[in-house]
Structure formats: structure tokens, C-alpha cells
Image (spheres, helix red, strand yellow):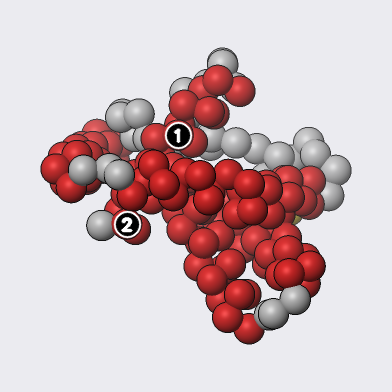
Amino acid sequence: MNIINTFLFYSIIGHFLENIIYTKIDSGILYGYWTPIYGLGVLLISLIFYLICKYVKNKLYRAIDLFFISALSLGTLEFLGGILIEKIFGRVFWDYSDQFLHIGKYTSIKMMTIWGFSSVLFIYLIHPFMKLIIKKIPKSLTITLAFLFVIDLIFTLFMLTN
């Protein structure tokens, strides 16, 4: 349940934050108030940090490793996500072609650097507090949100591919 709660919690938080930051766009491809790439990103960062902690004992090296591995991993996730959205739905939600050192149109060195710094800040400052909230999410709410998410995903895939 913790993985599902984490995914849903950060998908919803990411959706609202993106809509606050970028007021002229609607975040994500789904109809509901979630943007799954943020939930996937948090799960990926958490897995990366877990593996780093398992093999790297020095705390400074952990942070440095987290920065570089997260930058590459999240940049790759963003790149692949952009390609999949364009191939499946025929839409482009972001385009970094005008940025210096872009990698195609779906990621750039600038964005990868932001993802790296964000991952370090997230793991050390934000997530420890959020984990306390996530642990208190009732199972019934998790099941309800997961059900609604799956329905939204199916509905979106049906509507956008037809």
C-alpha cells in the first residue's frame, strides 16, 4: 500500500504544483487531478536512494551520487515519456528544443540538472515529512483513488486513441 500511496500522493501533488507554476497549461494527459510522471519519478528517486544507501556509506557521496544518477534517470524518464505521449496520443506537452544543450525536444542538460538538485532536496528535506502523511492515508482512500486512477487511465487511453 505504501508504494501505491506514494505514487498517488505525488501524482496529485505534482499535478497541482505544475498547475500553480505553469498557469497557462493543464498538467498531464489524464482527466483527473493527477500527473503520473511525478508519482513515477518519486518512486524512481526513492529506489535510487535506497540502492545508493545500500552501497555507499559516506553521506556526502550519497548526495553526489543521488544528484547524478537522478539527473540521468529522470532525464531519461522525461525523454521517454515525451516520446511515448507523442507516439500514443499524437500530442507534445513539452518541448525543450529552444534550450541550450537540449537532448531532442523532450529533455535538456538544464532540466536534468534541475531534476538532480530537486532529487537531493526532495530526499533530504521534503520526503521525510511527507512519508509521515503518506503512512496515515486510510486504506479505503487508497483503494478508492487507485480505482479512480485506473478508470481515468482507461478512459483517457480510449478517448485519445479514438
Question: Badges 1 and 2: C-beta atoms under 8 Å apart?
Answer: no
Q: Is residue 152 above or below residue 26?
A: below
Q: Residue at x 61, y 23 (%)?
A: 21
Occupied quadrant, residue 9: top left
What amino acid is found at the position of numbered circle 2 in the picture? Asn
How far across and how far down the image is residue 149, in percent?
24, 41
Q: Residue furthest right?
A: 100
Q: Could you say whether the residue bearing mark 2 is in a helix, strand or loop?
A: helix
Occupied quadrant, residue 31: top left
Q: Is residue 18 above or below residue 128?
A: above
Q: Residues within 10 Å of mark 1 (few under 14, many from 20)?
A: some
Q: Which mark is residue 122?
A: none
**Horizontal side, residue 33 vs residue 103: left or right:** left
Mark found first going from the N terminus, 1 or 2: 2
What amino acid is found at the position of numbered circle 1 in the picture? Ile
In this figure, which residue is indicated by the disc labeled 2?
2
**Quadrant in the picture for the N terminus:** bottom left
